[in-house]
Image (tube, rainbow, N blue to C red):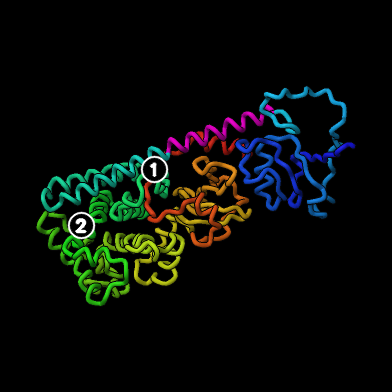
């Protein structure tokens, strides 16, 4: 008995068809090799594979989709053909057409992009680790060797600002826990990186940028005077404990005077908990009475504290934290600075778990200053090892959007294990444009 197989050309693909992707798993981006087309984005991805025709199953396709296509002449398993029969040791599976030149080129481009991204992230991760290590070392030695420690912090700030202020565009990345675990998280580094990126957006005078960076790294200097049982307490603080903790602003200014910190840095240390509406502490000053640099650090500090509280079980997702700041606490911060933070992080900041418009799951891993609303998303692809997971740059596929943010607890267990959402949200940046990725992506999306 002959088994009929229906084929359709790539140009005839339409939403509602149940298609087969007759390629090895590593040569296509889909979680499954057979599925019903749901979005125009999936059609675009199928056409990018360079395959001339696709098998499809009329019985599992929508009737409306079938009425709009005309299958190519049916092939049968017993039909005579002049095509060569693949030998048992060839890569092609039975029923899989030989790889075309276009398919081979597409595969090589994907491999090149993947290798380029791995190398790029290795450089970012190393810079992140080096900066975090330098900050922690300086903080440990600040009381014993203040001059050397402050000089070391100045050097970290200088390295960051040299990159940020001269770059055409900046990409903010969420750092992976695998590069060192929770101990690599550094609140001071997070605060400094985001503050200095805001300085770029604010077009801050160059002589103020180093003061902002140093103040961001030292804003919690006074916490060294507060007992660890209060600073590291995971449960909600008692009123007495909260009042004691608030003293760290005054303690920090006093310590900063002793080691000779500049006035702008002292202002950040003393005012990073003041609020635009006057509801902050320690003095309850408001609006223009708050130093401009302290306004920046106050906002970034609040965002990072929401994402990274002492008790990780009480942490907000980056999406939730940014949403709370904008909808519930916006009166506490200067409007322009808050708007620029949203523009910098995007609606879905790095580290946010998301569901895409084509129903795929993923995690935002980076956002580029050129297109903050179109971040890059690491996809949940169970057919691929997670260290080979594809990263979808949404700025290159306008037909695919983020449908919604997802809390880690709402992910299916297998997706949670695969995407490995971070316990601590840590950020770092780079300023390079991945030419291999951009060129290849433009070729394939054309």
Check contact, mark 1 vs mark 2: CB within 8 A: no
The numbered mark, 1 or 2, whose residue comes first in the sequence reads 2
Q: Where is residue 108 in the image (x, y as percent from the top left)?
A: 58, 30
Is residue 259 placed above or below 117 in the rendered structure?
A: below
Q: Is mark 2 on a helix, strand or loop?
A: helix
Q: Of 243 and 267, which appears nearest the observer?
A: 243
> Is residue 104 inside the magenta stretch?
yes
Q: Is residue 265 left or right of residue 236?
A: left
What's the residue at 60%, 36% (across, down)? 26
Q: Residues within 10 Å of mark 2 (few under 14, many from 20)?
A: many
Is residue 348 placed above or below 236 in the rendered structure?
A: above
- Circle 2 is placed at which residue position? 265
Q: Is mark 1 on a helix, strand or loop?
A: strand
Q: Position of residue 143 (x, y in %)?
A: 12, 53
Is residue 109 placed above or below 86 in the rendered structure?
A: below
Q: Position of residue 412 (x, y in %)?
A: 56, 57
Residue that lies at the very extreme toward the right in this rendered image: 1
> Is residue 146 inside the magenta stretch?
no
Is residue 84 placed above or below 252 in the rendered structure?
A: above
Magenta span dominant secondary structure? helix
Range of residues picked out in magenta: 99-120
Q: Where is residue 375 in the image (x, y as percent from the top left)?
A: 50, 50
Q: Of 435 and 128, which appears nearest the observer?
A: 128
What's the residue at 15%, 55% (across, down)? 261
- Circle 1 is placed at which residue position? 430
């Amino acid at each position: 008995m002959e088994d009929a197989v229906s084929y359709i050309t790539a140009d005839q693909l339409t939403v509602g068809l149940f298609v087969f992707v007759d390629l090895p798993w590593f040569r296509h981006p889909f979680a499954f090799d057979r599925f019903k087309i749901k979005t125009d984005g999936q059609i675009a991805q199928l056409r990018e594979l360079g395959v001339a025709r696709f098998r499809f199953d009329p019985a599992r396709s929508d009737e409306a989709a079938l009425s709009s296509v005309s299958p190519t002449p049916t092939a049968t398993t017993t039909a005579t053909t002049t095509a060569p029969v693949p030998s048992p040791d060839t890569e092609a599976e039975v029923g899989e057409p030989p790889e075309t030149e276009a398919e081979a080129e597409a595969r090589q481009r994907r491999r090149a992009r993947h290798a380029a991204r791995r190398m790029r992230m290795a450089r970012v991760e190393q810079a992140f680790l080096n900066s975090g290590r330098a900050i922690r070392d300086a903080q440990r030695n600040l009381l014993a060797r203040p001059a050397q420690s402050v000089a070391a912090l100045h050097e970290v700030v200088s390295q960051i600002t040299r990159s940020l202020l001269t770059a055409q565009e900046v990409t903010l990345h969420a750092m992976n826990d695998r590069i060192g675990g929770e101990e690599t998280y550094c609140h001071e580094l997070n605060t400094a990186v985001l503050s200095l990126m805001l300085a770029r957006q604010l077009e801050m005078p160059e002589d103020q940028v180093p003061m902002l960076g140093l103040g961001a790294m030292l804003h919690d200097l006074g916490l060294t005077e507060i007992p660890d049982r209060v600073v590291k307490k995971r449960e909600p603080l008692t009123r007495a404990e909260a009042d004691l903790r608030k003293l760290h602003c005054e303690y920090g200014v006093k310590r900063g005077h002793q080691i000779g910190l500049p006035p702008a840095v002292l202002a950040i240390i003393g005012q990073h908990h003041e609020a635009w509406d006057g509801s902050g502490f320690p003095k309850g000053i408001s609006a223009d009475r708050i130093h401009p640099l302290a306004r920046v650090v106050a906002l970034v500090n609040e965002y990072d504290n929401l994402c990274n509280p002492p008790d990780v079980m009480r942490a907000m997702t980056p999406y939730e934290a940014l949403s709370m700041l904008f909808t519930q606490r916006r009166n506490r911060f200067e409007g322009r600075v808050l708007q620029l933070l949203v523009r910098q992080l995007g609606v879905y900041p790095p580290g946010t778990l998301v569901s895409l418009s084509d129903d795929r799951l993923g995690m935002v891993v980076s956002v580029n200053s050129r297109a903050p609303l179109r971040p890059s998303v690491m996809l949940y692809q169970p057919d691929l090892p997670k260290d080979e997971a594809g990263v979808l740059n949404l700025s290159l596929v306008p037909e695919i959007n983020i449908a919604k943010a997802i809390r880690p607890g709402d992910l299916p267990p297998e997706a949670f294990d695969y995407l490995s959402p971070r316990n601590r949200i840590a950020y770092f940046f780079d300023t390079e444009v991945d030419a291999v990725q951009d060129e290849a992506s433009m070729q394939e999306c054309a």
